[in-house]
Amino acid sequence: MTTYDTIIIGAGHNGLVAAAYLAKQGKKVLVLERRAIVGGSVVTESFGEGFSVDAVQTGGTLRPDIIKSLKLEQPKSSERRAFISLQPDGNHLILDADPAKAAEAIKRFSENDALRWPEFIRFMNKAAGILDKAYATIMPRLPMDFTVREGYGLMEWGLKLRLAGRKDMLNFIRALPMTAQELVEEYFESEVVKAAVASLGIHGFTLGPMGAGTGYTLIHNWLNRGGLCHVNVGRAGEMTSALANAVKAFGGEVRTEAEVKSIRVENQAAKGVLLAGGEEIFAKSILSSADPKHTLLKLVGAQDLPPEFVWHAQSIKMRGSAAKIHLQTNGEHGIPDGTVVLAPSIKYLERAYDASKYGEVSEKPYLEMTTSGNTVSIHFQFAPYALKSGKWEVEGGKVEKLAIDTLAEYFPNLQSSIVNCKTLTPQDLEEIYGLTEGDINHGQLMLDQFLFMRPIPGWSNHKTPIDNLYLCGSGVHGGGGVSGAAGRNVVKVLE
Ligand SMILES: Cc1cc2nc3c(=O)[nH]c(=O)nc-3n(C[C@H](O)[C@H](O)[C@H](O)COP(=O)(O)OP(=O)(O)OC[C@H]3O[C@@H](n4cnc5c(N)ncnc54)[C@H](O)[C@@H]3O)c2cc1C
């Protein structure tokens, strides 16, 4: 019987990052993935001949320090494309990645906003940098006791925050609880500009731009994208294959079609895992990159956890409301390259969210499109996991039609260009990709679920009440989105 130093549940990018760092240290590691392919949400899949797409997430990349220390191939330098906000009158706002060109385009909507654009970009880059440092910091277990060593990271981050300068420090702290609307209103007067930027604050979250804390999510998404538009579109699979290859090159093992059914716990300590096929594998420590609810409530189970902790785990807010529609076309779809959003006004976005509060699919949705070759990928919000009525097996078709019909008003050739479609509903995200309630970030990024409160207050340092069991996916601090921070941080806890 082989005993491993560490078993990692899930071959999403965070699980693979953790595995690669540990294997590089010479640890005997085994990654277990329930699907036939690695990557989790960072995956390129084929849905038919010539119909290969990044199936789930839209874009993103690993933190540069991870790419460097794991000696991964740098993402091929792809030109940062424009962020395009569609307008009903055809007068679209094209925000080039070059601030000077973007300011020129903004002038058509407001001279004042064009003047303020460089300062907005400067502040957002600075704020994203501060958040990045927080994500690289292991949080102490507030409100529990923690050692000086555990508290040191937070103190160090506080110092970095202070070194950002008084004005930026204050504006960063103010921005977090603000609504995205309030944040953009501090800079801009044009509704078109405000809505375009605010849409970034709701991408992936079940909140509208008038929701408190969407100032924070706006900065979070800015950090993960490195600005407004997505990077590395169409290359998700390359990134996670490179990570899996790194794990193997450092001597680790990656097994696919190996679903963990339960984590074996004895005397409050994790000893190994039981696979769905009946095989038992033992290890000195278990890391789970599956979401915290799935890991704690399904793989461990309430019987092995303190009652109050179970209640906290049950209370983690998972509120998936995104669907994905991929269109294979003959290339004549008419949608420009870049990140294209349907976000004409703040009120439009807030109303799109309103529907989800009542378990309804937005009739006038917030859409975000990217293209790769002949395919068009549409991120659709809001399509709530928990429907008031109807079933996702039926509603999925309606979402697909609604997305295409809505876009056809802007791109008249789209309908006739479509060759094949593939739609993923929030239920599919749960069943196929293992995302509880279809929550794309393994738990909403809300102010009561971030920093030392992610995933559960008192348990923000990757540890759990079960000895030797650690969490390392998007649902823990550092996580949410593509970066690898959660996978990198857990390894520091183990050192
Ligand atoms: C529709 C959508 C759009 C998104 N858009 C963006 C975006 O634009 N930008 C961005 O930064 N992020 C985006 N995200 C979020 C981002 O993709 C995720 O937060 C991130 O990829 C999660 O990575 P992870 O490694 O933590 O977890 P996952 O990628 O979820 O990996 C976890 C892995 O664990 C496996 N697993 C689960 N349970 C078990 C088990 N019992 N046994 C074995 N294996 C198991 C799963 O199959 C999965 O492979 C999006 C996500 C979705 C779904």
Image (cartoon, rainbow, N blue to C red):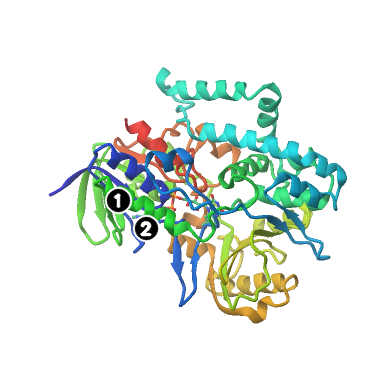
Report whether 197 appears left or right of 281.
right
Q: Quadrant of residue 461?
A: top left
Report whether 157 appears left or right of 491.
right
Q: Residues within 10 Å of mark 1 (few under 14, many from 20)?
A: many
Residue 204: % across, % down: 59, 53
Q: Between 181 and 338, which is closer to the camera in this rendering?
A: 338
Quadrant where the image shows the C terminus: top left
Sooner in the amino-acid sequence: mark 2 or mark 1: 1
How many dots with numbers? 2
Q: Residues within 10 Å of mark 2 (few under 14, many from 20)?
A: many
Whether disc 2's CB lies below 8 Å from ligand 1 is answered yes
Residue ranking furthest to the top: 148
Q: Secondary structure at mark 2?
A: loop
96 up-or-down from 86: above or below: above
Residue under the point 69% across and 47% down: 98
Report whether 234 appears left or right of 191.
left
Q: Secondary structure at mark 1?
A: strand
Dot 2 and dot 1 residues touching (CB under 8 Å): yes
Residue 456: % across, % down: 47, 37
176 up-or-down from 421: above or below: above
What's the distance in space between the residues labelled 2 and 1, CA to CA? 10 Å
Q: Which residue is mark 2?
A: 38
Q: Which of the numbered marks, if any, corresponds to residue 31?
A: 1
Q: Amino acid at mark 1?
A: Val
Residue 129: % across, % down: 58, 34
Residue 329: % across, % down: 59, 76
153 up-or-down from 226: above or below: above
Q: Amino acid at mark 2?
A: Val
Q: Between 273 and 369, which is closer to the camera in this rendering?
A: 369
Q: Quadrant of residue 128?
A: top right
